[in-house]
Structures are given as C-alpha cells and as structure tokens.
Image (cartoon, rainbow, N blue to C red):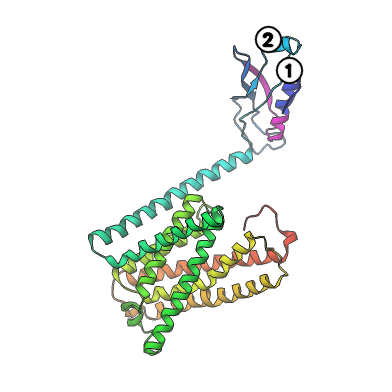
Amino acid sequence: MRRPTNYAILRFMVWRFILDNHVYGTRIRNFGFNVSGRVKSLQINNPKRLAGDKSKSIDARPLLFPINCQLPSNETKRKKKLPLSSIGDCYLSLSLKSDSMARTSTKQSDKNKVGVFFLATLLLWSVSVLFEIAFNKRKELLFIVAGACFFQIANWVIRLLVSRDPLFVNTSVSLLHSTITSVSVVFIVVNQWLRNGLNGMFEHSELVGSAWLWAYPALCFSCGYFAYDQWDMLQYRLYSGLIPGILVHHLLLLVCFTLALYRNVTINYLILTLICELHSIFLHVRKVRRMAGIRDSKSRIVRVEWVLNWITFFLARIASHLLITIKLIRDASKFEKGIELPLALFGMAGMNLLNISLGIDLFNAFKREKNPQQTSYHRRE
C-alpha cells in the first residue's frame, strides 16, 4: 500500500499501527537509519501500565522492532522530481505483537507440547506391537498392522479422489471405520447367538476367558484404526484444548485393547464396548453433512439424522457402557488376581466420563442447530 511522503505522516502511520494493536500509551522514541537509506528499526517506549487499566503492568524498557521501509535514493528522487529531503513511498511491516497474537502463540506452544506427548505414546505403542509380532511370534497381531494400513490407504484414496481437506478426509475415514466395526460387531454377536443361543453367552467365563468367532481379528483391526487416527490427528493437528478428549479416548482404547490382546483376555467384553460405533456413524454423518453445506435444521434429512443420533447415543453408547460397567462390578469377585479387573474398571470409568462429555457437546450442537441465529459464525463445531 503506497503511503504519503513526509516524515510526520510516517510517524502517524506508526501511531495508527500501535493503536490498532491495542498498545495504548506508547511513545515513539526514534527511527534508526542505515547507510543505504533503509529504515532498519523503530524504537518505542512502553509505559509501565496500560492506559485505563491499572491492574495490568507491562515492561517499561524501550523495545526495538525491525521495520521495512525502503527510502528512495537521491538519484530516484531526481528522476521523479522529488525533493531530496522527502521520505519517499514507505511500506511498513512492524513485527509488533498484540495481546491476541501473544495468546495465540501461547496456545500454539501448548498445542505443540500436547502433540509431542501423544506422539511419544503412539511411538512407544507401535514399538511394543512390532516387538510382540517379531520377537514373540504373535502373528495374529498382524491384523493390527493390516487395520492401520487399510485406513491409511483409505485416507490417501479420499484425499486423491474427493477432497484434500484434512478434516473432511479424517471424518470420512472415521465414518468408514464406524460402519465396518458396527457391522462386524453385530455379525459377531448374532452369529454367536445363532450358534450357541443366549444361554451362557454373557457369563463371566465366556466374556473374560473366551473369544467369539472373529472377535479377536475384529478387535485387532479396530485397534489398528485407532492408531492410524491418532497419527492422522497429530499430523494435521485436528484436535484442540490442553487435554484433547479425542486423543485421550484413543490412547485409553489403545492401552486397554492392546493389553487385552497380548494376554488374550476380556476380548468379548471389548467387542461389546464397540457397539458404541453404531452411534459414531451418525456423529460422523453429521460432520460430513455440515461440511457439505446441509445445515437447515428444518429439513427432513437433518431431523431424521438427529433422531437416530440421540437414539443410538442413549442405547448404543450410554446404556451399553453402563451395563458393561455394572456387569464388571457384579462379577468383580470372579476375576483372578491381576491386572484384568483394575484395567477393565479404569477403562470403563474413562469411557463413561468421555460419554458424558460427548453428550454435553452433542446437546450444545443440537441447540446451536435449532437456533442458528444465536450461533457465532466463527465457532467451529
């Protein structure tokens, strides 16, 4: 943007920049020039307290900020018939940080620390799985690797053919996983019911010490998805907050699932916990629908989706996880001494807390869609 050509207006521009960035009460000290005629720095003096707010104090030391203001040479001035004393056309670029920029920087730093922690846990988990496969000859765990590779390939295909938006790609792959897992769990449970009937199907010995047909590979495959999804969210930073619920959820599942797979216990219990993926289908459908621009809360498709969303939330997520928790508590005396019961109770406690948090978020999203005029346009759902 071209600026007027005298020194006073250059100072005025700096004042405007300072005011626009909410650094009130700032006084310009001086400009520093180098030999080539480029303004190399701007020194300003901050007061000890912000104007109008005596509760906040800031550093009173003079600060030196680099600016980019190329002054025309005398030869250029002669060609353009400018006075040799004129400042010339200036292009200011001050690196002064406003309060909001500082807050953004702090949040970004916190986000980096969170990402490093969860990335480290994911790497440790990966090393553990590969060690079991390679050195302990646990070839059945290769289904974990197969699951991670399958969903990563699905990610690449969607990114190549549909959209390169990381959030859309991640949500689409999550929808694929929820669909596959839901069908698998229903198939495993119904198949076991048809083969042996309900008699003894939910007994303690059956749920803890046995594995229904296809239950072990299905659990491994789903475990591979959670590892892939954790990596994808860390890679594209698809999370928020100091303690991102989705990353905690995935870490919790990876720990519980993997330890159960290593020891070959509580496989059927964990298969039953995956019934909640029926609800996840509608969570992901809602996200994809909103990204596709379908946001009219009065439309039939949105109403039907919300009805199914709430029904599956209470039945497939809340009710199923509560029943599993109650079953664990009732059968606590039947568990042998070891890590199985504490790990199972810890995992279900975490899942129930996350379900409550999810329910609150879902209710808030429902209210926002019903009252779009009260929704901030900049709020990300």
Mark 2 belongs to which amino acid?
Glu
Mark 1 belongs to which amino acid?
Tyr
Where, by quadrant of the figure, is residue 96 drawn?
A: top right
Q: Nearer the viewer, mark 1 or mark 2?
A: 2
Which residue is more in the foreground, 158 or 63?
Answer: 158
Q: Position of residue 71 (x, y in %)?
A: 67, 17
Which quadrant is the N terminus positioned in?
Answer: top right
Magenta span has 17?
A: yes
Residue behind mark 1: 7
Q: Position of residue 249 (x, y in %)?
A: 46, 62
Name the residue located 52 percent from the left edge and 73 percent from the top edge.
Answer: 278
> Who comes first in sequence, dot 1 or dot 2?
1
Query: Which residues fall within the magenta stretch?
Result: 16-32
Q: Position of residue 50 (x, y in %)?
A: 68, 34
Name the residue located 23 percent from the left edge and 59 percent from the top edge.
Answer: 135
Residue behind mark 2: 75
Which residue is more in the foreground, 16 or 237?
Answer: 237
Disc 1 versus disc 2: distance between alpha carbons? 19 Å
Magenta span has 18?
A: yes
Whether residue 240 is visible to the viewer of this picture, yes or no, is no
Q: Position of residue 199 (x, y in %)?
A: 38, 90
Which residue is more in the foreground, 236 or 94?
Answer: 236
User: Total marks drawn?
Assistant: 2
